[in-house]
Image: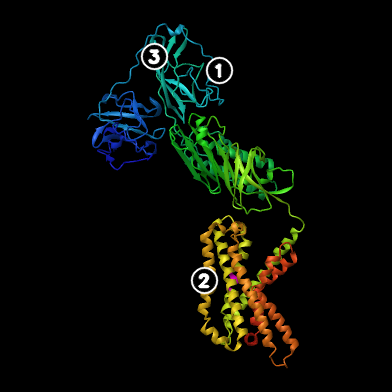
Amino acid sequence: MVLAFNFENQRAIDLDSTQPDPCYNYTGLDNPWRSINNTIKSSYNCDQYVSWSGWYRLFINGLSAHIPDTCVAQYSCGTHITLWIRGGHPTVTDGVVTRDVCGYWSSYCCYFGSFPIKVKACPDNYYVYELVSPTFCHSAYCADTGSINTSSTTVTPVTISPDPCYNYTVLDNPWRSINNTHYSYMCDTAHIPDTCVAQYSCGTHITLWIRGGHPTVTDGVVTRDVCGHWSSYCCYYGSFPIKVKACPDNYYVYELVSPTVCHSAYCADTGSINTSSTTVTPVTISPGINITLEEGCTSQNCFQNLLEKIENITSQVLSVTTVTNILTVAFNASGKILESSSSSSSSVSPAELASYGNRILKTSEKLISTLVKPTDTSDSVSFALAVVEVEVFMVGPQVTLDKIPRLDTTNSSVDIDLIGISNNNNNRSAVAFMSYNTMENLLKPDFFNTSNDTIKTMMSTVISATLPKTTNTKLTKPVNFTFKHIREFDPSGSLSCVYWNISEWIVDGCSVLKTNSSYTVCSCVHLSTFALIMQTSRPSESDSLLEQLDLLNLVCVIVGLVFFSLALLTFALCQWSPGVNNVARINICISLLLAHLLFLLTQQYLSLIRPQQVLCAVISGVLHFLFLSGFVWMFIEAVLLFICVKNLSQISSKKREVLSSGFLCVIGYTVALVVVAVSVGLLPEGYGSEHCWIKKDKGFIWSFLGPVCVILALNMILFINIIINLNSTLKNLNAEVSQMKQTKVLAFKTLAQFVNLGCSWILGFFTSGRKELEILFLILNSQQGTFIFLVYCVLNDEVRQQYRKFFRCLYCVKQH
């Protein structure tokens, strides 16, 4: 089905803008598809989406046309429901008149009633219309170039024998009273007022009343049209006409017929009766709904008053803009209440939080229900605010879908058999799906009462699913909800699919179907407000040691950053012998300095960064690259050291010929970049864990551990060979050199090179549950910068001489 809006041929005619007469101040509407002879079903236009303004004159390919005043077959006029006017066209002397608009459907010419329009006959034998948006889709005003009826429909009295005033059936159903507002949704035939009755009254859904007023005794039997109130319009549905007669003893009898639509029923009233014709006044969406938050509103009473105003809204249909504005005000108010209570000495009690949550849920569901409108096929409404995302899907009798699409929000989705539900509701039903981003501040996970003493963590956004304006809400199949984890999943934790029950989260009727570290699928046999809660064991006394380790880690990393910086300054500012190649050492310092600095800042501001999922994933990708490039440079340094020890006399020429600085830089960064690029291509969602690092699920952590393990294995082999070759070389040194001093320096440099080449990272594979190894691992690997500075700067005679010279100059400058 294609919706088409063709206004390319629309002609604007403004002959004299100073004349208020619409006969000379109108807009030409030339849409050939509006012709009553157009029965092509390839597209269905909808005039409800047109912004009508002022008066219009109809044309068909340049020929003057008019809106038909007799019934037009459905699926004509390029639309689904054909609109025509009842009561005939006026004459020139009649001036401007109002005519009701009917929509043909389901073998009844006035099955749907639309808002009345104004009509005027003009002297040159044409008509102008003040058009308004119809009450439903897909409907459109028809156009015809044929003859016109210029007389109103006259009601001719009918005589029936025997006299129905003395030959009738009593219908005594108290539920038909217009004062009965209980939603029992009856559906049959019965008795009637002659003015509009509020929907959901008379024990039914669509209230039926007669238009045109009741007759007098002298009128005899007359025919009256039947209207059904729905969607804020008194005559939204038109039902088959019935015969009415006034009897001498001041009562009325009716020849009733089955209505055209369910759930509808004839109403009954004991009040006064109108014996004159009734004009149907359109009930539109009130533009005057303006609910705002009072200035400085932070008190609980203010919040309660605001919610009461919202709950007192009586409109059955509201625009999306109105609903979003009201929801924004309501959630802003609840946020201010929570902020005010947290900053003051008087905190909000759990019972009050639950009460506020219930009110917000009730208010939200009521407002969302006003977005539901009747449809013949299917329709949907969606919007997203900072605090809530909403998806509404509606189906009607002509829906061609076997199942409705999955309703998705950012962090959740729902699969529901709405088609099956509609089959139990005369083929009409709707589902509303809401995802609340901040509701856990009110409906806290601690409201999940369990027998064991555990920590409860909200793992998802709070969601609600309802069936607004649907009579039979019984599910035909269980509903499946998919929750995306908004916090990192603890494998030792226990997940529960829960729903909100007034003051607590409970699990009745819900179960976990599938789960992994990223999402969980829940199945429920009822609709309500749902969430996913994880239970974990409370921390033991040993957790205090973890806090101490965190503090030690912070101090060690900061110290390491300082020495990385000092080493870089030394490499950059000091003069080095021509045979010394510091390229690998400089790049080790750069890579690890940036990696440790970024990781430190990320952990310090994790609460701000974590909600920004894209930023968190980017940071984890950059960390992946920086740490990998650091390990690649450690491998290059190991190779250079091995060459140096193997052939000390040829190292300088060897490096110039084979291992130039440019070649080393290409290797050092390209290898890490390729690994990260391949990882992103294979599993982009693998980045961005709870701590903005690589996720552990699906084995993605091996995109880091794999290359690291290979490099560590190679570095260990090279390190052992370096020690063996170095030991052999030292045996040939001058015997006069102090063996004690040589042994001490050699032992320290050996330990330092073990750390500088990254070999100490091997301890990370053996630290599980052993605090001593964790502390050793933390200290050694955070101090790579310290060891590099000590070995290549402090213990280097040439560098020490330049340090002394620098400090002497600095001292002399101060003296002068």
Left or right relative to 39: residue 635: right
- Residue in view at x 63 percent, y 71 percent: 712
- At horizontal 62% and vertical 38% (from top left) the residue drawn is 358
Q: Is residue 433 above or below residue 154?
A: below
Q: Earlier in the sequence, mark 2 or mark 1?
A: 1
| Nearer the observer, 94 or 247 | 247
At mark 2, the secondary structure is helix
Q: Amino acid at mark 3?
A: Val
Identify the residue position indicated by label 2 in the image.
670
Indicate the quadrant containing the N terminus: top left, top right, bottom left or bottom right. top left
Image depth: mark 2 or mark 3 in front: 2
- Pointer 2 with pointer 1, Cβ within 8 A: no
**Which of 508 and 353 lies nearest the eye of the viewer?**
508
Span shown in magenta: 590-594
How packed mark 2 is, by other alpha carbons closer than 10 Å (few <14, some 14-19, many 20 or more), is some
Return the residue found at the far right.
541
Q: Residue 222 bears which disc, if any? A: 3
> What x and y, as percent, mark residue 116?
38, 28
365 falls in the magenta region: no
Q: Is residue 592 magenta?
A: yes
Dominant secondary-structure state across the stretch colored magenta: helix
Residue 521 percent location from the top left of the image: 59, 45
Q: Secondary structure at mark 3?
A: strand
Q: Is residue 109 above or below residue 814?
A: above
Which residue corresponds to mark 1?
Answer: 174
Judged from the image, the secondary structure of the residue bearing numbered disc 1 is helix
Q: What amino acid is found at the position of numbered circle 1 in the picture?
A: Pro
